[in-house]
Image (cartoon, rainbow, N blue to C red):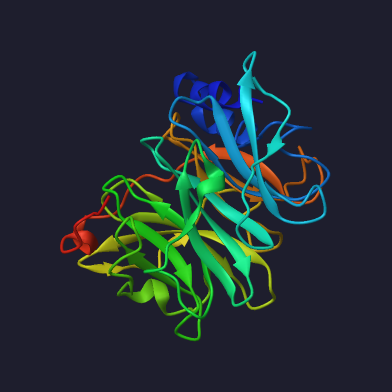
């Protein structure tokens, strides 16, 4: 439901902020419509707050769905007419409303795609960024640079490129040492991101990482009660109309609709110093 942003914004104005945070740490998004008994992951809300795009397996396979805002609630979602691959995940709407980025699974693995936001059937592969391995989870920072995850080096790492996929390369720094960065969401323009790390037991956890001194640092777990490595949290997403908030997929004890649901919480404060992108000009 779209009342969740209002509830989260209320935290800043209450007298007992720690008490309110305990009560309103997160909320579920669109119970029964966006979040259902199936699995949902990877949500993105447009800057005008009128549409949400997300991935779901509610009809038997992972594909992209969209809902429009109706009476301050998300309307009934409809599948997007995307023909790329046998499955689609990781949608990301650009802040300017021009583009829909996503990943699709084809014969050689997962590849990155970009389509006009209002014409998803016209999706084109980001050939310059794709490889014979897997690429997942494309997102743009506010300077127009693309971050994504790839296992082309033999391990899942964080990569960066121009917005059209050109000049793709692995980032430098301790963040890539684990080899377990399976998804990434770029935040701001100074070098912050929330990544999905897969732990040794196969569970996933969201980690806030940032750029400092030209290196992407290992960061720290997102401060969320069910992001403790005992369950599943993954696939962070942006609501461009609420930049102080973060969307994510997970399984909280309550509220819960089904498998993986979409939740809304606070975005982490920026800790990046902007040095990792200083030599990478954005491309259209």
* Residue 167 in the figure: left or right of residue 57: left
Residue drawn at point x = 68 percent, y = 68 percent: 203
* Residue 9 in the figure: left or right of residue 142: right
Count of all numbered marks drawn on residues in the image: 0
Placement of 48 over or under 193, stated as above or below: above
Placement of 14 over or under 113, stated as above or below: above
Residue drawn at point x = 59 percent, y = 40 percent: 53
* Residue 19 in the figure: left or right of residue 170: right
Frontmost residue, 97 versus 244: 97
Quadrant of res 185: bottom left
Residue 34 lies, in percent from the top left, at 70, 36
Residue 274 lies, in percent from the top left, at 21, 55
Frontmost residue, 168 versus 182: 168
Residue drawn at point x = 62 percent, y = 16 percent: 72
Is residue 184 among what the camera can see? no
Residue 59 lies, in percent from the top left, at 81, 48
* Residue 277 in the figure: left or right of residue 218: left
In this view, which residue lies farthest toward the bottom?
Answer: 154
Residue drawn at point x = 49 percent, y = 62 percent: 112
In this view, which residue lies farthest toward the front?
Answer: 122
């Amino acid at each position: 439901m779209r009342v969740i942003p209002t509830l989260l914004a209320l935290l800043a104005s209450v007298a007992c902020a720690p008490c309110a945070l305990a009560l309103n740490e997160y909320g579920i998004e669109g119970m029964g419509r966006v979040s259902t008994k199936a699995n949902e992951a990877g949500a993105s809300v447009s800057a005008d707050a009128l549409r949400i795009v997300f991935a779901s397996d509610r009809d038997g396979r992972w594909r992209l769905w969209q809902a429009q805002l109706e009476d301050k609630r998300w309307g009934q979602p409809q599948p997007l007419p995307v023909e790329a691959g046998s499955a689609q995940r990781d949608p990301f709407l650009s802040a300017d409303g021009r583009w829909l980025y996503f990943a699709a699974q084809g014969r050689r693995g997962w590849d990155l795609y970009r389509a006009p936001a209002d014409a998803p059937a016209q999706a084109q592969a980001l050939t310059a960024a794709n490889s014979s391995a897997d690429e997942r989870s494309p997102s743009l920072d506010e300077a127009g640079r693309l971050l994504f995850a790839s296992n082309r080096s033999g391990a899942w790492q964080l990569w960066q490129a121009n917005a059209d996929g050109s000049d793709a390369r692995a980032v430098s720094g301790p963040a890539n040492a684990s080899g377990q960065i399976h998804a990434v969401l770029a935040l701001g323009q100074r070098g912050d991101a929330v990544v999905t790390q897969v732990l040794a037991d196969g569970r996933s956890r969201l980690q806030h990482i940032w750029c400092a001194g030209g290196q992407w640092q290992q960061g720290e777990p997102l401060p969320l009660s069910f992001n403790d490595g005992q369950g599943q949290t993954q696939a962070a997403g942006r609501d461009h109309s609420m930049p102080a908030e973060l969307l994510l997929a997970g399984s909280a004890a309550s509220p819960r609709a089904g498998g993986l649901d979409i939740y809304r919480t606070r975005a982490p404060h920026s800790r990046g110093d902007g040095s990792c992108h200083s030599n990478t000009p954005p491309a259209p």
